[in-house]
Image (cartoon, helix red, strand yellow):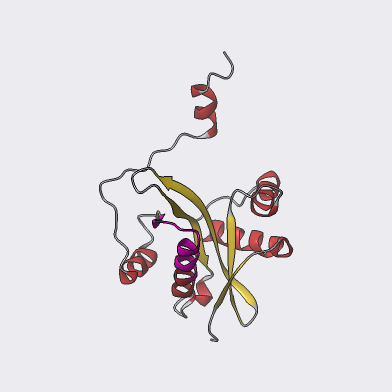
C-alpha cells in the first residue's frame, strides 16, 4: 500500500465525507445520520460559518479515512485545544500507517493553530484504538469523567415549554 496523504476536505468532498461517516456508524453499530443530520454535517463543515474542520486520508487517491476537529479552550493554559471528534480509518486500510499519518498531520494542525494540546475520547471497547493511542505515547486521562445532556435535556434545562 502506498504512503497515505492527509488533506483538508473541500465542499467537493461532501459525499465522500458522508460515506465515511456512514462507515463509522456501521462500524460502531449505530444508526447512520438522517437526511437532516447529513445536511447539517455538510453545512457545519463547508458552510458560510464552519463549526468543524474535516480532513481526509487518502491512499492512491482513494479516501480511506476522515477526521473531524474543532477547537475548545483551556482557561488554565490560556490556549486553544484541538479536539478530535472523529477519526475513522476503513478496516481494510488499517495497519498501513494511515492513523499515524493522521495524528502527525493533526499535530501539525494543532501547532499551526497555536494549540496547547490535543484531546479526544475513545470507546472503552475499542481496544485496537486504545493500543494505537498508547503506542503514540498519548496519556489516558483517568481523573476526568465525560458528562452529557441530550437535546431534550437541554431544552428542559433552558426552560423551554414553561
The quadrant of the rendering that contains the C terminus is top right
Side of 91 relative to 16 (left or right): left
Q: Position of residue 79 (x, y in %)?
A: 41, 50
The image quarter in which residue 54 lies: bottom right
Residue 95 occupies quadrant: bottom left
Residue drawn at point x = 29 percent, y = 53 percent: 141
Q: Residue 43: x, y in percent?
A: 69, 49
Q: Residue at x 34, y 70 (%)?
A: 136
Residue extending furthest top? 162
Query: Residue 89: horizontal and vertical position, in percent?
Result: 52, 69
Query: Where does the magenta region start and end?
Result: 105-119
- Please tell me which residue is depicted at 52% across the width and 56% down the height of the picture: 69
Instruction: Please name the residue shown 46% across and 58% down the image.
Output: 114
Q: Is residue 123 above or below residue 13?
A: above
Above or below residue 17? Residue 45 is above
Left or right, 105 with respect to 120, comes to right
Q: Residue furthest left?
A: 143
* Viewer-proximal residue among 129 and 117: 117
The residue lying furthest to the right in this view is 12
Number of residue marks: 0
- Relative image position of residue 123 (x, y in whole percent): 39, 55
Horizontal relation, residue 105 to residue 17: left or right: left
In the rendered image, residue 77 lying in the magenta stretch gets the answer no
Amino acid at each position: 500500500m502506498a504512503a497515505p496523504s492527509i488533506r483538508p476536505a473541500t465542499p467537493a468532498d461532501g459525499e465522500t465525507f458522508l460515506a465515511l461517516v456512514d462507515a463509522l456508524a456501521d462500524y460502531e453499530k449505530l444508526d447512520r445520520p438522517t437526511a437532516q443530520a447529513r445536511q447539517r454535517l455538510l453545512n457545519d463543515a463547508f458552510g458560510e460559518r464552519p463549526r468543524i474542520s474535516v480532513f481526509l486520508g487518502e491512499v492512491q487517491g482513494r479516501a480511506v479515512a476522515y477526521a473531524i476537529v474543532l477547537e475548545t479552550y483551556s482557561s488554565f493554559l490560556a490556549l486553544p485545544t484541538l479536539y478530535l471528534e472523529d477519526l475513522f480509518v476503513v478496516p481494510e486500510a488499517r495497519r498501513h500507517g494511515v492513523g499515524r499519518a493522521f495524528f502527525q498531520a493533526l499535530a501539525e494542525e494543532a501547532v499551526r493553530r497555536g494549540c496547547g494540546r490535543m484531546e479526544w475520547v475513545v470507546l472503552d471497547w475499542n481496544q485496537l484504538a486504545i493500543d494505537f493511542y498508547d503506542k503514540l505515547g498519548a496519556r489516558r486521562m483517568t481523573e476526568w469523567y465525560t458528562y452529557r445532556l441530550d437535546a431534550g435535556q437541554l431544552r428542559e434545562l433552558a426552560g423551554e415549554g414553561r
